[in-house]
Each structure stands twice: as C-alpha cells, then as structure tokens.
Image: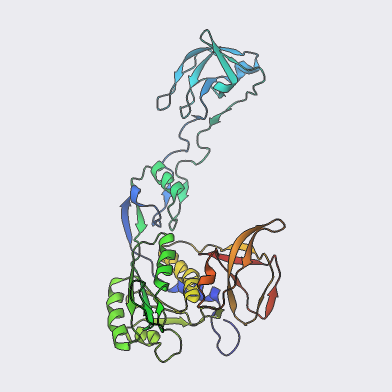
Amino acid sequence: MTSGASALPTPAEAEALVREHVLPLPVESRPLESLAGAFLAQSVRSERDQPPFDRVTMDGIAFASQAWRQGQRRFRIAGIQAAGYPPLNLVDAADCLEAMTGAVLPQGCDCVVPVERLRVEDGCAVVDDDMPVEPFLNVHTRGLDAREGDLLLARGTRLGAPELAVLASAGLPRADVRIEPRILIATTGDELVAPDQPIAAWQVRRSNSYALRGALNLRGHQRVAEDHLPDDHAVLAERLSAHLATHDVIVLTGGVSMGRYDHVPSVLRQLGVREVFHKVAQRPGKPAWFGIGSTGQTVFGLPGNPVSALVCLLRYVVPALAAMAGAPARAAEHVPLGSAFKVKPPLAFFLPVGVEYSSTLGMVAMPRPTRGSGDFISLLGTDGFVELPPGPREFAAGFLAPLYRW
C-alpha cells in the first residue's frame, strides 16, 4: 500500500487484488472453427512427432549425398515422390527421385537439390558443380519441431492463428475453452444524453459506453450489453439487481466519487456486492471501485470522466477478464519516454502517449497529456498510456515505462 493516511492501493496492488478475487469462468466444448480468440481450458500435446516424417522442403531431386561426395553429378531420374504418398525406395545410388515439396523423403535418400540448381537432359538430372550438398539439405527432419507427447498449448492460452493450427495438427476437431463472459457496461448520470437524442445546453453526450465497448470488442469480447441508469438510488438498485442476475461482469461508469448523487457504492453494498477496494493511488481514475457479487459476479465502478474510465478499463477490467479465463498475468510492454515529463502529484500517473520512432532511442512513447480527465478529444492520435511512478519527479527522456495500448 502507499504511505500516508489514505493508504490506498497502488495500481499494481489493485490489479493483484482483482486477479486474486475474480472467479474462473465455466468451461464449454466448442468446434475448432469457432475458437478464434477463446481461452483454452485444457492442455494440448503433440499427437505425433512434428514433422511426422523427414519432409522435403523444396521441389527438386532426392538422392544419396554419399554419391555426390564420390564425384557423381549426373543422376538418372528413377521416379517421382509426390506429397501424400508412401515413401519410394531408391535402389541404385546412381539414380535420383523427383521429390515434391511436402513429400516424405524417399528411402535411400538423405538430401534434396532444388530444381533451380539442376538441369534435366535425356531422363537425367545434372546438378550444378558449385551446389553445396550435405546430408539433410532441404529436408525438415522428423521431430525437429516437437516430439510425440510434447506440451504444445497450456491452459489459459488465448487462441490465435498459430494456436488454431496447432490444435488441428494435434487431431482435435474441438476443444474445451472458457465461455465468453456476459459483460454489461452501465453509464450513470442524469446529464448524459444518447447520440441520437435532442440535447440541451447543460447536458453532454453519452460517449463512455462506446469507447469502453470498443476497447473490449477489439480484445475479442463480443457479448457486451449496455444500459444507462439515472442518478436515482431506487432505480439504480432495481436495474442493477436485474443485471447482476444475468451478467458475469458489470462495468459501471460514474457515480463512484463522493458527491451527493454518487449512489453506486451504497447501492452495490445493498445488493450484496462485497467491496474489495474503493480508490487507487493514481491519477486519473483515483475513485475506481471493485467488488465481487454474492454469486461471484465481477463488478467495477469506474469514474465517469472519459479518460479515467478508459484507463481504468485497460488497467483493471481487461486483466480481470484474462484472469477469469485462466490466462497467466503477462508483463506489460515497456517503452522509453521520447521526451522528459514531470509528474507533480504523489500518485501513479497515467500519461497518454503516441508511439513513434526515434533515431537515438528506437521506439519511444511521446507524451501527449490531456487537459484533464474529461478531455477525451486529446486522446485522438494517441496509442495508449504509460504508467509513471508517483511524483513530484521529472522523468527524463529514455525512462522505461509500461505501455498500455488502447
């Protein structure tokens, strides 16, 4: 915890509390073609050696390299080894076999010379004199990538294109994965008006839900619903009770600070949601709230200011969803600052940045500070935010900071 009377958790401590308290999602079996983006709930081992045989990697001729070492350059073509067929047998070392990419290496052969390095005349293949020939040239040897029974994918792995190929290669037409969580984003506040509704001079457009939903969608979460709740204790209680009964994750924005109409913490307590923390030693987003529902629902109360809501979603909600899916915690990407920046408050500071290239530092995070946590316009053109330690302190160009991308 941070020092001082408030003893608020640091962002790292808050994330650790989130990971410690969330419950794992249920498991379901799904067909291979539906698994992109899902989190694996089983381990996967290699069905066979990979490759399962000595595999030809280029179209050409296969022969015994010993014959080459003995001075032979002209080989009679004795047949064709096509992909998907049992291995042929090279009987005479003076012969060769045409071999296609992906084919099993014929018996009696231990190398492949590509077609670009030979010429064919009178039924014979003549190899270039300067061709460097050695055993297993252009051959992907059996078991080089994995041995039968090797662990290929661990529980908690998120399934992308390479992982789906591995599942198929292991002979699995379906796999056990964590279910996609049912997420609700609920905005609060009487001043908020939907984009398609008439608006008064003293009102503002409701934008948080679109930003938060978009960030979740970009990370593969598609079961995201929305609701807008007024600053009314009774209505909040009624609607949140219904949402807690039908969703795994509730993400509220607004109503978590200390104002007269900030009812969210008290309503959640009334509904049996146990508070784990309220406020984090950070700026922006200090009022962030997190708790666990009576049946294990994950509940976040994020500040209503747009910048605060978005950084808190990435810093805490996204890790929570990963932990619920069984994914291990991953170290954040670290990028050096492209220019100096001074942090004044004694709180961790979330600084929006643009990722650029520097001739001296390589990839850098250029500070793009906003005019406050309500200034979401200044986020345009940025790539994410870095987390800087508490101030007062000036961080020089080159200071390595964790980067969280939008």
Place of residue 312 in the rendered image (x, y in percent of width and height, measured from the top left): 48, 73
Give the residue drawn at x 54%, y 64%: 381
Above or below — where is 70 with respect to 182?
Answer: above
Give the residue drawn at x 40%, y 27%: 84
Place of residue 279 in the rendered image (x, y in percent of width and height, measured from the top left): 50, 82
Q: Is residue 188 visible?
A: no
* Residue that protrudes farthest toward the bottom in the picture: 260
Nearer to the camera, 401 or 42: 401
Place of residue 267 in the rendered image (x, y in percent of width and height, measured from the top left): 35, 86
Dividing the picture into quadrants, the one containing residue 170 is top left
Report the side of 331 relative to 303 (left or right). Answer: right
> What quarter of the picture does the N terminus occupy?
bottom right
Report the side of 137 relative to 266 (left or right). Answer: right
Nearer to the camera, 276 or 115: 115
Dividing the picture into quadrants, the one containing residue 118 is top right
Nearer to the camera, 399 or 27: 399
Above or below — where is 124 with respect to 317?
Answer: above
Place of residue 109 in the rendered image (x, y in percent of width and height, measured from the top left): 53, 21
**What's the colour scheme?**
rainbow
Q: How many marks?
A: 0
Dividing the picture into quadrants, the one containing residue 10 is bottom right
Above or below — where is 225 with respect to 283?
Answer: above
